[in-house]
């Protein structure tokens, strides 16, 4: 029988806390950048021209259909060799995770936009709205309500994916737990604790998103 | 009801053509509506009535012909370039108010916000001023008590009256109705027609696509009968309904006479 002993973790509490901080910061930064990339890509994809569509499809395809771990390693190890640009681990991982997230966000946002009935576009145009006014006032507010579950889902994945940044020595939660494991030889306790920390952060978040959905759908 | 005729021409459509792929939807349509005039457009489903209205506010793009509303005109040359820059396109569209068969209200806004949207976003009016005007318009269509209701909570007739108020709010020079009562339960048709009738009394220039023959005969100055993308017959409202000249007009109207609707 394995003899569980979580008490050894207490001395590493600050290390875990710092790791959690890095994980959250990374999630926030790559989600925001990913959302920005995704929004721009989604809006550009609405232009009915192959000059814009083809490169955007290539970008989305490339990042959606290759493993994010490979992208991370590629940005850190291969990019310097090809371009001479040397990225810090955090920058390489941040860039890869943002572009990876951006590809998924782009599809979610585009899907949300094109799901809005043609009648809404007609109604806005007939009033004399300009493109950006129609997007901002009519299309996006409705699309965001519909996209929210998928966006939140992607945000959750984004947080869990930051754990892959440990592969290029970004000191996130998982990286710290590897260090603690190396010192304590207690991988089961360490990784169980880490799993619980992820759960404690993410589960309330998913509940909050659900509450937001209900609130946005009120009165309709 | 032809007392308004003879004023300056408010809408002028010349030789309008439009195809979707191989299908010719409009095959050379011309019409004029004088200021304060009311033109009704009738015809079987698929004859191009909606497309014609959508060309007049540039929601659809003709391949040839021209459209003039008030003092603004656009000629179509069949090229792939955009008709007008975004700003000019929007400005052109704001000359007309359009009411759709399926209302197309903005579901994330209350009735009041729907009506305020054009004045605030398009006309850049101050909110307080826009709200006062919107409340007056809702009162005019009999919906003062529904100002804070979301479209999802309104009946079809109420939705369509909000949609009319929304279109009126941008102070268009022409109102266009595309089968405004076709999606309504029969008992709700009357309240919408009453609003349109009120606008006619105020001298609003209107193009009305409708299947309500009795209403068209009564309210319109002239009526156009369309079939297969062409105007088959045009004439004063009462004579076109009562004594159509063309055989196809007669057989179309026979459906309605049979149902006792005229
Ligand atoms: N966006 C479109 N793409 C292809 N065909 C269309 C489109 N809009 C309308 N049509 C076709 O054009 C014809 C005329 O349609 P419409 O103007 O809606 O007729 P009506 O309003 O008289 O019923 C129909 O055959 C319809 O299928
Ligand atoms: Mg139609």
Image (spheres, rainbow, N blue to C red):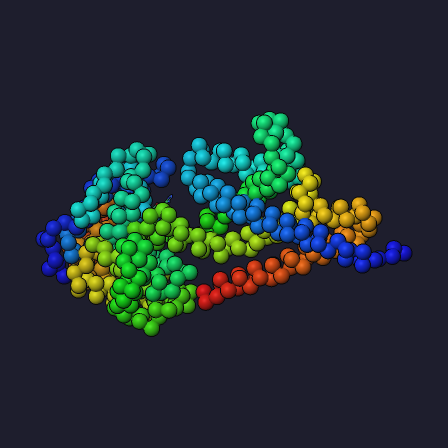
Residue lying furthest right in this view?
A1
Image quadrant containing the N terminus of chain A = bottom right
- Would residue B49 appear left or right of A170 to someone viewing this image? left
Q: Could you tell me if residue B258 is visible in this image?
A: no
Farthest-out residue, bottom? B145
Q: Residue at x 30, y 53 (%)?
A: B122
B144 is higher (above) or lower (below) than B183: below
Name the image quarter holding residue B64. top left
Q: Residue at x 39, y 68 (%)?
A: B149
Q: Position of residue A182 (x, y in %)?
A: 80, 45
Front in this rendered view, residue B130 or B221: B130
Compared with residue A206, is residue B27 higher up or lower down, i.e. above or below? above
**Quadrant in the rendering for residue B184:** bottom left
Q: Residue at x 51, y 53 (%)?
A: A147
Would you place residue B33 above or below residue B63 in this image? below
Give residue A78's position: percent from left, percent from top: 63, 30
User: Residue A128, image x and y in percent?
Assistant: 30, 51
Residue B174 vs A77, above or below: the answer is below
Q: Quadrant of residue B21?
A: top left
Residue A196 in picture, x, y percent from top left = 72, 57
**Quick one: quadrant of the C terminus of chain A?**
bottom left
Front residue of B104/A209: it is: A209
In the foreground, B30 or B176 = B176
Can residue B129 be seen here? The reply is yes
């Amino acid at each position: 029988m394995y003899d569980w002993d979580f008490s050894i973790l207490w001395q590493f509490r600050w290390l875990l806390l710092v790791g959690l901080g890095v994980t959250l910061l990374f999630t926030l930064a790559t989600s925001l950048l990913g959302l920005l990339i995704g929004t721009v890509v989604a809006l550009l994809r609405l232009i009915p021209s192959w000059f814009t569509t083809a490169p955007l499809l290539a970008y989305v395809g490339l990042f959606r259909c290759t493993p994010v771990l490979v992208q991370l390693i590629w940005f850190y190890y291969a990019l310097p060799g090809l371009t001479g640009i040397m990225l810090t681990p955090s920058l390489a991982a941040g860039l890869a995770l943002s572009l990876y997230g951006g590809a998924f966000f782009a599809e979610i946002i585009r899907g949300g936009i094109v799901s809005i009935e043609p009648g809404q576009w007609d109604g806005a145009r007939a009033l004399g709205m300009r493109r950006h006014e129609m997007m901002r006032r009519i299309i996006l507010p409705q699309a965001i309500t519909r996209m929210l579950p998928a966006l939140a889902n992607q945000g959750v994945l984004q947080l869990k994916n930051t754990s892959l940044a440990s592969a290029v020595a970004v000191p996130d939660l998982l990286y710290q737990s590897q260090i603690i494991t190396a010192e304590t030889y207690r991988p089961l306790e360490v990784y169980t604790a880490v799993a619980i920390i992820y759960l404690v952060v993410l589960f309330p978040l998913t509940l909050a998103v659900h509450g937001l959905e209900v609130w946005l759908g009120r009165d309709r | 009801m032809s007392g308004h005729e003879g004023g300056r021409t408010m809408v002028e459509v010349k030789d309008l053509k439009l195809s979707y792929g191989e299908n010719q939807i409009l095959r050379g349509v011309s019409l004029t509506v004088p200021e304060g005039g009311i033109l009704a457009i009738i015809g079987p489903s698929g004859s191009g009535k909606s497309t014609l209205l959508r060309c007049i506010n540039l929601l659809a793009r003709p391949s040839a012909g021209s459209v003039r509303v008030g003092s603004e005109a656009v000629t179509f040359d069949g090229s792939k370039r955009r008709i007008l820059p975004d700003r000019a396109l929007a400005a052109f569209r704001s000359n007309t108010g359009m009411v759709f068969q399926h209302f197309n209200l903005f579901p994330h806004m209350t009735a009041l916000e729907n009506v305020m949207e054009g004045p605030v976003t398009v006309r850049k009016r101050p909110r307080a001023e826009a709200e006062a005007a919107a409340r007056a318009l809702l009162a005019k269509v009999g919906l003062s008590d529904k100002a804070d209701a979301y479209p999802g909570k309104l009946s079809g007739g109420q939705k369509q009256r909000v949609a009319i108020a929304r279109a009126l709010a941008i102070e268009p020079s022409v109102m266009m109705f595309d089968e405004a009562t076709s999606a309504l339960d029969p008992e709700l048709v009357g309240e919408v027609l009453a609003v349109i009738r009120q606008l006619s009394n105020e001298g609003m220039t209107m193009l009305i696509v409708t299947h309500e023959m009795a209403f068209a005969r009564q309210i319109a100055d002239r009526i156009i009968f369309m079939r297969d993308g062409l105007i088959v017959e045009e004439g004063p409202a009462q004579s076109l309904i009562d004594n159509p000249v063309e055989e196809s007009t007669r057989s179309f109207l026979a459906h309605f006479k049979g149902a006792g609707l005229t």
